[in-house]
Amino acid sequence: MDFSKLKGEIFFNNSFINSRKANIHVLNHSLHFASSVFEGIGVYNGKPLFLKEHLIRLKRSSEIMKLSLSYSIKNLEKICRKLVSKNKIRNGYIRPIVFRSSHSMSPETKLCKSQIAIAAWKWGKLFKKRALSLEISKYPKLNKTVYPVDAKSSGGYQTSVIARSNLEGTKFDDCLMLDLKSYIAETSACNIFWIKKNVLYTPTENAILNGVTRRCILKICKLNKIKYKTGNFKLKDIYSADYAFMTGTAAEIQPIKSIRNVKYKINSELVNFLKIKYESIKEISPNLIEDLN
Ligand code: PMP
């Protein structure tokens, strides 16, 4: 799909306008220096899932990347809900983006103004396959010590973009990325989990975007007394797992069938249980993870 041909309305320059008119100049700062932050929010039955949670992360990402965001979370919530209803979206995705204007063509940002645009479109699950094959990226995920990975910033995606481009023409669907110390981080745009002897494992927040879906999964585990461990893990840890899956707003809970030539079973009782729970959470559509009980 060519997103520049998206129909409907986009919130831009403080109003809802025809999507075709929501344009920026080619000399935009964020286009040249990847200086934007954004969010991806799922919409189910016309209701955005974990809307407030995502907007809090957008605010935080903006602060980290020194972009001013004059809208309150409450205001942004209202705009997102209105956009969903204006575009008649039942199942889809909301993409708010905060970016810099065209007042600088260097990393200097003093004269740049922050702008926000929010788009929404009808969308299904990101991956159509039942289970995915992963390659290992030759590019690392950057660690907290060298890049603010907790911001969902466009700059943070550069190694993911190259890693995914390198998969073109191969049998792999996505790639697993290690951090600078060769600990497991995440996939190009999802968090990763694996199960070994009924215990769930996922990397700590050293070199990952701490996904809303990841936090939701850990909350489900807590509420249902499912044993899980977060920590620093090496490839040998995931290679000896029974099952593996990845999580994200658009991917939801996506089973993995192999990493390189290591194969995983895909019919896990625990993953099925998490999927059922996640489906029921989608129905009640809470605003915050802490609302789950
Ligand atoms: N890691 C990365 C790099 C991502 O881009 C995403 C979002 N697609 C995630 C993890 C998962 O985050 P969330 O569950 O909040 O969508």
Image (cartoon, grey):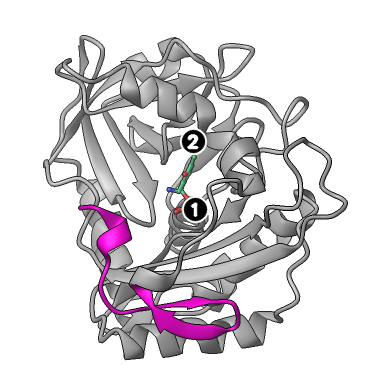
Q: In which quarter of the image is residue 82?
A: bottom left
Please say whether residue 100 is one of the residues in the magenta stretch.
no
How far apart in space, not on screen, are marks 2 and 1 (Cα)?
A: 9 Å
Q: In which quarter of the image is residue 274?
A: bottom left
Q: Nearer the viewer, residue 245 or 58?
A: 58
Q: Quadrant of residue 17?
A: bottom left
Instruction: Name the residue: 37% across, 47% down.
Output: 247
Tag 1 residue: 218
Give the secondary structure at mark 1: helix
Tag 2 residue: 202
Indicate whether 264 appears above or below 138.
Answer: below
Q: How crowded is mark 2: few (under 14 residues within 10 Å), some or many (20 or more)?
A: many
Residue behind label 1 places its C-beta within 8 angstroms of ligand 1 = no
Where residue 159 appears, as percent x and y from the top left, is 50, 24
Instruction: Name the residue: 36% across, 32% down.
Output: 194
The residue type indicated by label 2 comes to: Thr
Tell me where the magenta segment starts and ends, as one range: 1-19
- Pointer 2 or 1: first along the chain: 2
The answer to whether mark 2 and mark 1 are in CB contact below 8 A is yes
- Could one spot residue 74 in this view of the protein? yes
